[in-house]
Image (cartoon, rainbow, N blue to C red):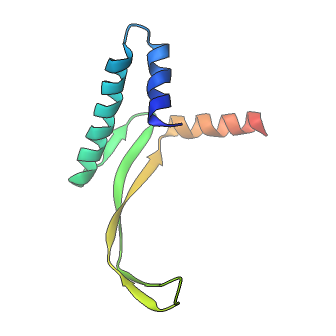
């Protein structure tokens, strides 16, 4: 699902909230999650999940073209951990699909 599809579905479901307001709300939510990650804070949305940063240590990788070793610096990567309710819903829906 894309961001625009999400906005469309929310605005269809919540009739009193216009498309522009829904778009603003979704963009603001995403901006707040990004802002908290930029300063190293964890964001938790109860029942849905949490967004946090995980540090990846520096390591030696390989250039896929030449096979030569390449030094890769350490970096932060974004991590999403689904909440209990989301995990249960996903597992129940998979049982119904299979």
Task: Count all numbered tags in the image, as a single digit.
Answer: 0
> Where 22 sits versus 67, above or below?
above
Who is closer to the viewer here, 31 or 93?
Answer: 31
Residue most extreme to the bottom: 68
Q: Residue at 60% x, 34% y: name it.
A: 89
> Where 64 sits versus 11, above or below?
below
Who is closer to the viewer here, 84 or 30?
Answer: 30
The C terminus sits in image quarter = top right
Residue 19 picture location, percent across and down? 38, 18
> Where 38 sits versus 75, above or below?
above
Residue 2 picture location, percent across and down? 49, 37
Residue 28 picture location, percent across and down? 28, 32
- Classify residue 78 as left or right of residue 28: right
Residue most extreme to the right: 98
Q: Residue at 38% x, 7% y: name it.
A: 16
The N terminus sits in image quarter = top right
Q: Residue at 33% x, 57% y: name it.
A: 53
- Classify residue 91 as left or right of residue 54: right
Q: Residue at 28% x, 39% y: name it.
A: 31
């Amino acid at each position: 699902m894309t961001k625009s599809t999400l906005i469309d579905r929310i605005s269809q479901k919540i009739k009193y909230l216009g498309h522009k307001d829904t778009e603003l709300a979704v963009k603001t939510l995403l901006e707040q999650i990004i802002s908290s990650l930029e300063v190293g804070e964890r964001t938790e949305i109860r029942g849905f999940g949490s967004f946090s940063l995980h540090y990846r240590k520096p390591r030696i990788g390989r250039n896929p073209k030449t096979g030569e070793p390449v030094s890769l610096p350490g970096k932060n990567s974004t991590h999403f951990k689904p909440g209990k309710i989301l995990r249960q819903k996903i597992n129940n829906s998979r049982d119904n699909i299979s």
